[in-house]
Image (tube, rainbow, N blue to C red):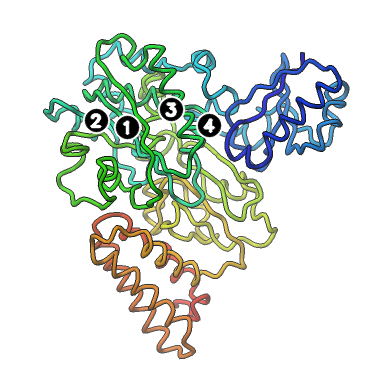
Amino acid sequence: MLSLCISCDSLARAAGADQVAEALTHEAAQRNLPLRIKRTSSRGLYWLEPLVELDTAQGRLGFGPVAPEDIPGLLDALAGDHAGHALALGPVEDIPYLKTQQRLLFARAGITRPLSLDDYHANGGFEGLRQATLLDGDEVVAAVLDSGLRGRGGAAFPAGIKWRTVRQASAAQKYVVCNADEGDSGTFADRMLMEGDPFLLIEGMIIAGLAVGASKGYIYVRSEYPDAVRVLNEAILLAREAGYLDVAGSGVAFDLEVRVGAGAYICGEETALLESLEGKRGIVRAKPPLPALEGLFGQPTLVHNVLTLASVPIILAKGAAYYRDFGMGRSLGTLPFQLAGNIRQGGLVERAFGLTLRELVEGYGGGTASGRPIKAAQVGGPLGAWVPPGQFDTPLDYEAFAAIGAMLGHGGVVLADDTLNMAGMARFALQFCAEESCGKCTPCRIGSTRGMEVVDRLIASTDPAYRESQAGLLRDLCDTMQYGSLCAMGGMTPYPVVSALKHFPADFGLEAAQ
């Protein structure tokens, strides 16, 4: 029997994976050809989707991107010399884009079926939980601390410190909350993992609940991810039926629930998310108190993003030292970088911290899709700095990026060619902030609107002296927003604005700094 694998990931399906699967089924029936199609997670090689993989004793052989009209010829080739087919990619694991990655979080990507507990077990699933049940809570927290894991949502705060704080807090009820409100442009790692490997996130949350003494967990998913919501709900049901939400017989009850957001970017901020979970309007809370001490419903709450919680089973299964061996400086482990925008080979690249931005966008991404020169890459979402090619040799490391006035954020990288106008992008960042601000603090609420007006005046003027004065005003305004805003919404909006002013003054009609 011919055994083929096709992704059921929503991006692969948007590229035509369902139509390819239907065409294969129909054509095989016409030929009386025994055929089995497994719908797996995605490898993250999105420029090759729809990707069809032939299961062989020597491993999987790839073909892509495949269109429905390619199916008759593909089946002909599979019956004979498939290596000579125009869409043949050879062994999937040997594709350079994939072969040089260091996949920990996405080790099962493209290999397993998302809702198969058997597949998950066969590929190391629940080994971290098994190890955690052999330790007490303090030892689990110590392992997370020793691993050097930092929050992958963007703030990069040491995860183990949060765990220790919640564990040491005295309360009858504690919570674990997963921030799956992945709203940054060009990011999709959370979605990929929730759709493709949901049991990994569930396992991480169970371990967290066991360690900090929480009995209830919530996964707050953005409404734009209906497939992730469906898969998570089904996976939670399967895990509950299999007994995993009793923490594998430890006697500590833990349960999970998925909650769906309503489209507000600000609810990606942890305290606004907690307000939303409580049924209130998503408005940022003042800190202190910290959510670790007074979070959801006023109780100690461990809040992490998807990738942070999904890293925990690996740390428990393979040890803190194993995880710590990846990375550089204080940036340890791996980060799934997401390549998007005007890029030839868009997709997911999981590597240890320390490779350069140039290796990422030119080596993996292959440069711009348009073939024009690269102008800049925006790293860290819509509020990330624009990094010019002259800084592309900067290591992808939290501290190294902070040193050049940038941030890694959630690992999203959006590439742009030389046709992009940076004055327009600076204005867009301020407009985005004005539209998405919760309105609680003045620097963010008023500063973003005034900032748009300043940019408009700056680019409309033909007077060099006036332009310089407005540029100075814009920098002062950005300084106020960065240091005076209540949360990262207003505090990070200056990054794309200031970096555009600094590196691309000509787009604003300004003279380059001497």
Q: Answer left or right for 293 relative to 430.
A: left
Question: Marks 1 and 2: in contact by CB < 8 Å?
Answer: yes
Q: Residue furthest left?
A: 170
Q: Nearer the viewer, residue 457 or 142?
A: 457
Q: Residue at x 36, y 48 (%)?
A: 399
What separation in Å lies between label 2 and label 4 (alpha carbons)?
Answer: 32 Å
Observer-side mark, 3 or 1, equals 3
> Image check: 50 left or right of 170?
right
Q: The residue under label 3 is which amino acid type? A: Asn
Which badge, 2 or 4, comes first in the chain's sequence? 4
Q: Residues within 10 Å of mark 4 (few under 14, many from 20)?
A: some
Q: Position of residue 183 (x, y in %)?
A: 43, 48
Percent from the top left, x then y, of residue 91?
A: 71, 26
Can you tell which of label 3 and label 2 is closer to the viewer? 3
Question: Dividing the picture into quarters, in which one does residue 324 lie?
Answer: top left
Callout 4 secondary element: loop
* Residue name at image x 43 percent, y 36 percent: 327
Where disc 3 sits, the SS reads: helix
Across and down, in percent, residue 368 comes to 64, 55
Circle number at residue 233: 3
Which residue is nearer to you in this view: 507 or 231? 231
Q: Are marks 2 and 4 in contact (CB under 8 Å)?
A: no
Separation (CA) of disc 4 from disc 3: 29 Å
Mark 1, residue position: 218
Q: Earlier in the sequence, mark 4 or mark 3?
A: 4
- Quadrant for the N terminus in the image: top right
Q: Which residue is mark 4?
A: 102
Does dot 2 land on a helix, a strand or a loop?
Answer: strand
Residue placed under numbered mark 2 in the picture? 175
